[in-house]
Amino acid sequence: MRKSVLISLALVFLAITPLAISRAFVDNTTYDTVYVKSGDTVWQIASKYATPKDDVREIVFEIRRINKLDNNASVYPGQALKVPVRPYYLR
């Protein structure tokens, strides 16, 4: 009886393990490095990387998060920003 319970628990664990793997652990995102030019904003940079399926606000959020920018997302000329790039098959 005890052996069958342990086997059942092991099978349940093995079944749900793939569900526990998130993008945080398997991050295959690639990044472009963009050098800010005079007059650039994070919104403008994000919109250049957005596809018609994308919400520019989400890309702005990701740029801010990746580069640890404040809520104003202030950038200055010459600053290097990492910008997430979607693989071609997800565009």
Image (cartoon, helix red, strand yellow):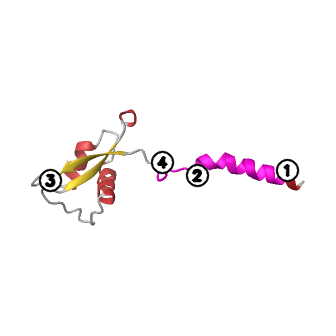
Based on the picture, tell me whether residue 49 belongs to the magenta stretch.
no
The reply, left or right, for residue 21 in relation to residue 88 is right
Between residue 55 and residue 86, name the one nearer to us.
Answer: 86
- Determine the secondary structure under disc 1: helix
Q: Which residues are magenta?
A: 4-26
Say which mark, if any, is on residue 26. 4
Quadrant housing residue 32: top left
Disc with the residue nearer the chain's start (1 vs 3): 1
Disc with the residue nearer the chain's start (2 vs 4): 2
Q: Residue furthest right?
A: 1
Disc with the residue nearer the chain's start (1 vs 2): 1
Assign the magenta stretch its main secondary structure.
helix
Question: Mark 2 near mark 4, Cβ–Cβ under 8 Å?
Answer: no
Task: Find residue 13 and report its horizontal and vertical position in percent.
Answer: 69, 51
Task: Find residue 71 and report its horizontal and vertical position in percent.
Answer: 27, 66
Q: Amino acid at mark 1?
A: Ser
Q: Amino acid at mark 2?
A: Ala
Q: Residue furthest top?
A: 89
Disc with the residue nearer the chain's start (3 vs 4): 4
Question: Mark 1 near mark 4, Cβ–Cβ under 8 Å?
Answer: no
The reply, left or right, for residue 14 in relation to residue 68 is right
- Determine the secondary structure under disc 2: helix
For label 1, the residue is: 4
Q: Amino acid at mark 4?
A: Val
Disc with the residue nearer the chain's start (1 vs 4): 1
Question: Which one is closest to the eye, mark 1 or mark 3?
Answer: 1
